[in-house]
Amino acid sequence: MSSTDLTTDLTSVFDDEVVTKSLVRDVALPGGGTLALVTLDNGHDHTKPNTLGPHGMNGLKEVVDALAERARAGQIAAVAFTGKPFIFAVGADLTGVAKLRGRDDALAIARLGHDVYSAIADLPVPTFAFINGAVMGGGVELTLACDYRTISASVPAVALPECFLGLVPGWGGCFWLPNLIGIKNAVKVVIENPLNTNRMLTGPQAAKLGMADVLLEPADFIVESIRWAAGVLHGSITVQRAPIERDEQHWARVIETARGLVEAKTGGAAPAPLRALELLAGARTAERAAAFAAEDEAIADSLMSPQLRAGLYAFDLVQKRARRPAGAPDKSLARPVTKVGIVGAGLMAGQLALLFLRRLHVPVVMTDLDEERVAKGVQYVTDEIDKLVAKGRVSSDEANRLRALITGDTDKSAFADADFVIEAVFEEMSVKQQVLAQVEAVVSPEAVLATNTSSLSITTMAAQLAHPERVVGFHFFNPVAVMPLLEIVKGGATDDATLATAFATAKALKKTAILVSDSPSFIVNRLLGRFMSQLGAIADAGTPIATIEKAFAGVTPMSPYVLIELVGPAIALHNNETLAAAFPDRFAVPVGLKALVEAGRRGVYRHDADSAHLDEQALALLPSPAQPVELDAEQVRTTTLQALADEARRMLDEGVVAAPMDIDLGMITGSGFAFWNGGLTPLLDREGISERVTGQRFLPPGVADAGK
């Protein structure tokens, strides 16, 4: 079967494709000549970005072939590609991947992209990409097929995110990019950024790397791009690019360093980044046809892989389930929030205040025990606003508005007209109960009282109040500005109006909200607590920390004891103590962790200027059993994943969350579990751990693991 036959057959697989059309108009160039401007547009607003499926790509190929004829006839001097407002194109349409009938279909997708982009690259007139908005994956590769690129300074996202999902950049990205910006910069875009929780480049950053030839302002971007293109065509503008280092040893060193990063991040559990490195390595000497053939094979393999299925499952969770939280009440029940109160003025309270200010644009008042603490908290917020101005993320006018909205007080009567008050005080039940009682005494009966507790019972916290129905858990993750997850916890008395207001507020804050029933440590901290409890027991029994640290590459975003440093040993210990008190049959307080906290240690590492090493003094604080039980890394991994499978099943049986998807969404957005695993439960299913431990899978076969 030829590639053309395969491509034609694909259109029936992608029968529900939202087709991105290629709309052509002729533009008279300053100084003479005609530019054929191709605008990619799927006919929807910017909330549904342009994607590139078989129907749309076939249409683009027809347009390019027609433009080639016009170019040969001398009717056009150049061709340019751009996108609809705010969007260039965000890559291949992956919605039909689950319907692929086999590797031939996957191979057809790869060949289709190469056929179309080769036709663009081979046009007999100069080609330009006017990158006016977000551009990712196949969209980036389309721009690479062009001879020249302009980019708007307002572009928020430029990325080749394929390795984040378990895929490889397969429409020319692994060949064209290193030959445009050099192997080191290409590795940053193809490997490093995706593996660092899918980090995106802005327009200016992409231009600095050399992914565009000129950076232009957004107000008149298309007009100026056309003017710039005319200058290139007529010779008044000379495009200069940094020379590419093609030394074989340099290229090999960069690839080998990147291989080490991939191994550290994935533990070999995600084949796609390693396959992408092979393609990048070959790009130094390969001819285009050979490079594209290699990409064809790589994309066909990765499209059929369980890692991609898991990655697409995870992507679907954060794109769709996150927008329609399971169990959320009717949004019409939500009350307006016109003023926010925050009890506390410490670091967490300051982060909360800044978030509420930036997203809600309503007055925010912070309270604390004395003027000094209040002043320090308000100063933190204003300092952070100043930093945002310095980074160009907030205008001076906006900064002045935000500063005018933040105030502080030592008297909780400042909350009298607040609609939403959240406490961020010490994680002690009696302290939180006292604070909520003081707030209730001054606010209206309809005001929502929220708690940022990470582990304590909402029901118990609200039990002594006159209106326990308006108390809700509103658990953020640190750092607040970065972590997407917000656990909304329904107490025993919490009513629907309170929950609806909480969900509406979470949406306004641009957080991923998950409804959780009132249970110790909720979703993420309960699973991380079981994780840490299990690892603590393994360490206490004699397995070296160095072995434990190697066991979870490709599962967790960082090694366990690095995670403890990030969270803080005291917080991790408190969470374990809470869970051990609630579930003494399977949670225990790690002796070693307690020793670190009592010694005032931040963790087990010593940090030098640019590296971290295990600290022998810290390790000496850990237990030294007379008869140590030492596990290897694989045993550590398996034993701990078995514990997580047990805990996840218990949480579902108890109704802590509505479905396994909420567990996975929580672990992805709250603790950075890898997309290519699908979070947690697809990994447990794929490796057979779910059935061994609980007697059943979490998800139906094929949902996130290609039926494996």
Image (cartoon, rainbow, N blue to C red):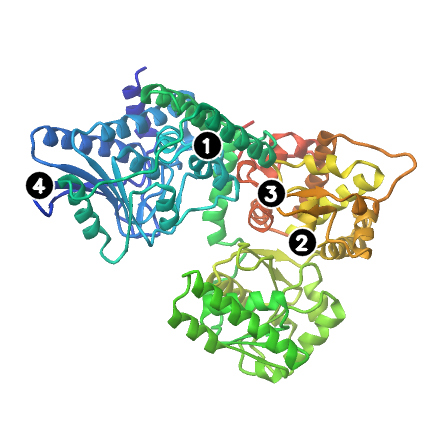
Q: Amino acid at mark 2?
A: Val
Under tag 3, what secondary structure? loop
Q: Is residue 627 left or right of residue 669?
A: right
- Report how far apart the C-alphas of labels 3 and 4 lie in the structure: 53 Å
Mark 4 or mark 1: which comes first in sequence? 4
Mark 4 or mark 2: which comes first in sequence? 4
Residue positioned 52% across, 32% down in the render: 258
Name the quadrant of the N terminus. top left
Question: Is the Cβ of the residue at disc 4 closer than 8 Å to that at disc 2?
Answer: no
Question: Is the Cβ of the residue at disc 2 closer than 8 Å to that at disc 3?
Answer: no
Q: Amino acid at mark 3?
A: Pro
| Crowd class of label 2 (few under 14; some 14 to 19; many from 20; radius 10 Å) | some
Residue 22 vertical position relative to residue 332 in the rendered view, above or below: above
Residue behind mark 4: 33
Residue behind mark 2: 567
Question: Is the Cβ of the residue at disc 3 closer than 8 Å to that at disc 1?
Answer: no
Q: Residue furthest top?
A: 1
Residue behind mark 3: 557
In the rendering, at what x and y percent does residue 573 appear?
76, 54
| Crowd class of label 4 (few under 14; some 14 to 19; many from 20; radius 10 Å) | some
Instruction: Pick the residue in front: 302 or 385.
Output: 385
